[in-house]
Amino acid sequence: FLSFHPTMNIILNVEEDHLDFFKDLDDIRSSFKKYTELLPDDGYLVINSGIEDYSYFYSDSNCNVITFGLNPQTSNYSATDFHIDDRGDYCYTLLYNNEEKCKVALKVPGEHNILNSLAAIAAAVTLGIRLDTAVKGIASYSGVDRRFQIKGKCNGFTIIDDYAHHPAEITATLKAAQHYPHNKLWCIFQPHTYTRTKALFNDFVKELRVPDVVVLAEIYAAREQNDIGISSMDLSREIPGSVYCPTLDKVTAALARIACPGDLILTVGAGDIFKAGEKLLKEEK
């Protein structure tokens, strides 16, 4: 992104990731700072005030800064008075500079989508779109493929697919799922790349202890070779009660054998884990 020449940047979060390229989190933060410095003086930075030391990113820039977040004391655009429906979708009151403006209704679940919607509204209004038009647009947005995408029902349980492949993304997806109707919550996780699995191993273990049942598919190699000798079986050893499946066919077989009516099954990962859920739905038909 340092090859771009934007007039507006939106920074949703800055997390420790892609450590096959970046040295560490400080290196990532430095890169985002350089990205912000590409903005012209009349450009705009829309940034999450929940990011640690967020002013660092624009400290050497003359651009216009608009903040959003869940803390109205540090955010131009923030939210209060949250309500969650039976599908986990949020409704909230929009605040601008701590002044109530209007109600915002989302058709996508998860607290992270409150932040996404605040960023979208901030960007739209800054670009000259009327607030009521922006809010109406938000209300009509029902999501994209592979982001908490409801795939269907099979044998009485629901299958939802999500692209999450970083521990923070998994946390957001699981939090959203906890507000969705279910008996047991299953997380069928396929780690994405060997280097990410190794670098964030302990974080993956921590987050994957949250669901009721965890099934681990083998790591999706993507662009890598397994030169470091790591496997999803290593994760499984650290997650009590988890099930390791070396192939997607075995994932599907395990789901068909163990899942019960009323359970919620999340297929999670940036690889081809969604195929396990799709195969289960196809076999049911």
Image (cartoon, rainbow, N blue to C red):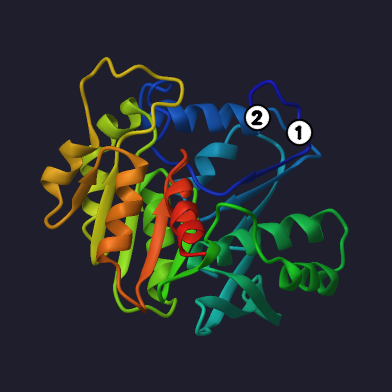
Q: Residue at x 73, y 33 (%)?
A: 39
Residue 118 location in percent, x, y?
A: 64, 63
Q: Are marks 1 and 2 in contact (CB under 8 Å)?
A: no
Q: Is residue 120 above or below residue 90?
A: above
Residue 141 visible in the snapshot: yes
Q: Residue at x 65, y 29 (%)?
A: 37
| Residue indicated by mark 1 | 6
Residue 108 location in percent, x, y?
A: 59, 68
**Left or right of 161: which side holds 62?**
right
Q: Is residue 93 above or below residue 243?
A: below
**Left or right of 70: which side holds 194?**
left
SS at badge 2: helix
Q: Quadrant of residue 191?
A: top left
SS at badge 1: loop
- Number of marks in picture: 2
Amino acid bearing label 2: Glu
What's the distance in space between the residues labelled 1 and 2, CA to CA? 10 Å
103 vs 250, nearest the viewer: 250
| Residue indicated by mark 2 | 37
**Left or right of 158: which side holds 145?**
right
